[in-house]
Image (cartoon, grey):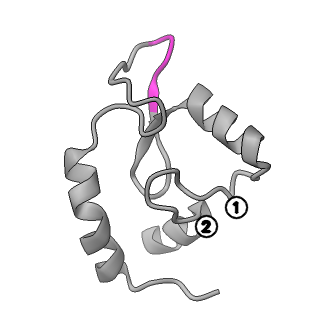
Amino acid sequence: MAVPHSAQVEAALAPKLESHEGCGICKQADDTPEAPLVYIACAHKFHQECLDAYKATRGFSDDEMPCPMCKMTQLEAAAFEQ
């Protein structure tokens, strides 16, 4: 599997990360104890309930799931952290 160079990924994600507030799926900015925002490996944030529904309706496993915003899989994003 080819993984993009990390500088390319960082450049592509920077505008999205700077302008992104709240859940990337439901677009609500709520970060409460009942519905906390969680970051996935690519650094986008979502409500866990929204992520669970996204995965379930599309049949993804945790590692195969592409980010709903940048489409990077969690395995690809995790490779940049190493």
**Callout 2 amino acid:** Leu
Q: Position of residue 4 (x, y in %)?
A: 45, 84
Mark seen at residue 64: 1
Mark seen at residue 44: none
Q: Secondary structure at mark 2?
A: helix
Residue at figure coordinates x 70%, y 51% from the top left: 62
Please tell me whether mark 1 or mark 2 is closer to you in this view. 1
Q: Badge 1, how many Cα within 10 Å: few under 14, some, many 20+?
A: some
Our reading of the magenta stretch's main secondary structure is loop
**Which residue in the structure is indicated by mark 2?**
75
Determine whether 18 is above or below 21 in the image.
Answer: below
Residue at figure coordinates x 39%, y 30% from the top left: 27
Residue at figure coordinates x 52%, y 50% from the top left: 68
Q: Does label 1 or label 2 sit earlier along the sequence? A: 1
Give the magenta range.
33-37
Question: Is 20 situated left or right of 24 in this image?
Answer: left
Quarter of the rendering containing residue 2: bottom right
Q: Position of residue 51 (x, y in %)?
A: 60, 37
